[in-house]
């Protein structure tokens, strides 16, 4: 009777690709860098005559 029994294997799962690591909070100097860049951009625009 064992000849009539079908044996099934579980299909092998492909390993999941490594996901992107969740980003933590921004370092404290990033907002200050943004403000400095903005100030330089405004100063440059004033010197050129756009503002």
Image: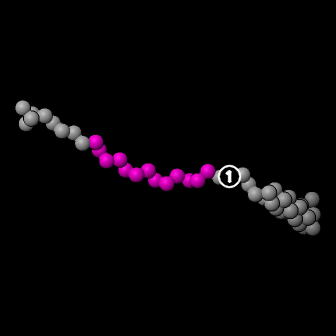
Left or right of residue 20: residue 7: left
Q: Name the residue at 80% across, 57% down.
A: 28
Query: Label 1: which residue?
Result: 24
Q: Of 4 and 40, which appears nearest the observer?
A: 4
Provide residue 44's location: percent of width, then percent of height: 88, 66
| Image quadrant containing the N terminus | top left
Residue found at the very far top of the displayed protein = 1
Q: Judge whether residue 14 is colored magenta.
A: yes
Chosen colour scheme: one colour
Residue numbers of the magenta segment: 10-22
Does any portion of residue 26 appear in the rendered image? yes
Provide residue 30's location: percent of width, then percent of height: 78, 59
Is residue 51 positioned above or below 22 on the image?
Answer: below
Number of numbered labels in the structure image: 1
Q: Name the residue at 21% across, 39% down.
A: 8
Callout 1: helix, strand or loop? Answer: loop
Provide residue 45's location: percent of width, then percent of height: 89, 63
Residue found at the very far front of the displayed protein = 2
Q: Of 38 and 22, which appears nearest the observer?
A: 22
Does any portion of residue 45 appear in the rendered image? no
Provide residue 4's location: percent of width, then percent of height: 9, 33
| Image quadrant containing the C terminus | bottom right
Left or right of residue 23: residue 14: left
Q: Judge whether residue 19 is colored magenta.
A: yes
Q: Name the residue at 44% across, 50% down.
A: 16
Q: Main secondary structure of the magenta part?
A: loop
Q: Residues within 10 Å of mark 1 (few under 14, many from 20)?
A: few
Q: Name the residue at 89% across, 61% down.
A: 39
Q: Of 29 and 39, which appears nearest the observer?
A: 29
Q: Quadrant of residue 46?
A: bottom right
């Amino acid at each position: 009777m064992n000849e009539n029994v079908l044996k099934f294997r579980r299909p092998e799962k492909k390993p999941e690709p490594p996901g992107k690591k969740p980003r933590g909070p921004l370092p404290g100097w990033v907002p200050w860098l943004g403000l400095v860049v903005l100030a330089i951009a405004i100063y440059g625009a004033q010197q050129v005559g756009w503002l």
